[in-house]
Amino acid sequence: MIELLAITDDPAPVPPPLRVVAAAGLGLVVSAAAKDDVVDAEALWRREDLLEELMQGRTVLPVRYGTLVEDDTAAAEAIAGRAEALAAALRRVRGAVELSVRVLIRGENGEGSPGEQLQARAAGERAAVEIHARLSAAAREHARHVGPELLRAAYLVDSAQVDSFVALVRALQNEHTELSAICTGPWLPYSFSEGEDA
């Protein structure tokens, strides 16, 4: 069994224990896997470390954790019908990383009357709309995700612009002291790995 880790269009070798399986003009980064591998936080972080190491030298699309196939032939077959869409997705994310931002009401813990809580929530939602608009303008693309926060979103940011994007998050935090803005990354482009037709 082998695990599919990422898709790339860079033919350069990858560090062991990883290897690349050529398929439809692309490369599948794979590693040996056993059916009884333990899935725990440590295993997930090891995989994330491997992918981040790959990200340093090439454009990659991460593959969903636990995607196993029997052999190299099955790996190639797994992407055979999607090669064009995957190549387009690689072009889409080339030179960029994903930054995640969550915005919450600072100290939201049920204090105040129900009316005051509703007013604070409504004001926070309006501020979150403004924050998202300004962050979206500083990114190539954005993707909002469902969550309990006022805002949970991912932004595809040019690698050279990461520091300025983080500085913008900090500036927005300073403008909206009633909110807490949490920025994490850079990550692989998980939210942007598939095109509309992929």
Image (spheres, grey):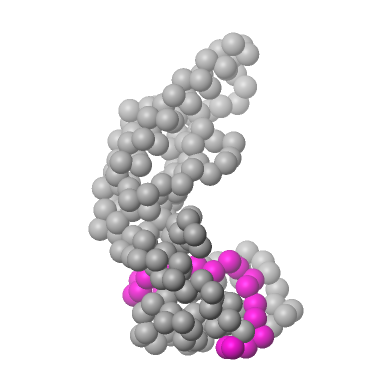
- From what the image shows, is residue 80 above or below residue 44? below
105 on left or right of 112: left
- From what the image shows, is residue 43 above or below residue 135? below
Which of the pair 105/10 is nearer the observer? 10
Instruction: Give the x, y percent position of residue 27.
Output: 45, 81
Residue in the picture at 30% in, 59% down: 159
180 on left or right of 109: left
Asked if one can make out residue 17 in the rendered structure from this viewpoint, the answer is: yes
Magenta region includes residue 195? no
Asked if one can make out residue 1 in the rendered structure from this viewpoint, the answer is: no
Which of the pair 107/5 is nearer the observer? 5
- From what the image shows, is residue 170 above or below residue 191? above
Instruction: Give the x, y percent position of residue 86.
Output: 45, 69
- From what the image shows, is residue 56 above or below residue 75? above
- Residue numbers of the magenta segment: 51-73
Instruction: Give the x, y percent position of residue 186.
Output: 39, 57
Residue in the picture at 48% in, 26% down: 125
Which of the pair 85/19 is nearer the observer? 85
Residue in the picture at 56% in, 27% down: 108
Toward the right, the furthest residue is: 36
- How many numbered dots are placed on residues in this image? 0
Residue in the picture at 37% in, 84% down: 11
Magenta region includes residue 53? yes
Q: Image quarter for residue 47?
A: bottom right
Q: Which quadrant is the N terminus positioned in?
A: bottom right
Q: Image quarter for residue 79?
A: bottom right
96 on left or right of 73: left
Q: Image quarter for residue 189?
A: bottom left
Instruction: Give the x, y percent position of residue 105.
Output: 50, 29
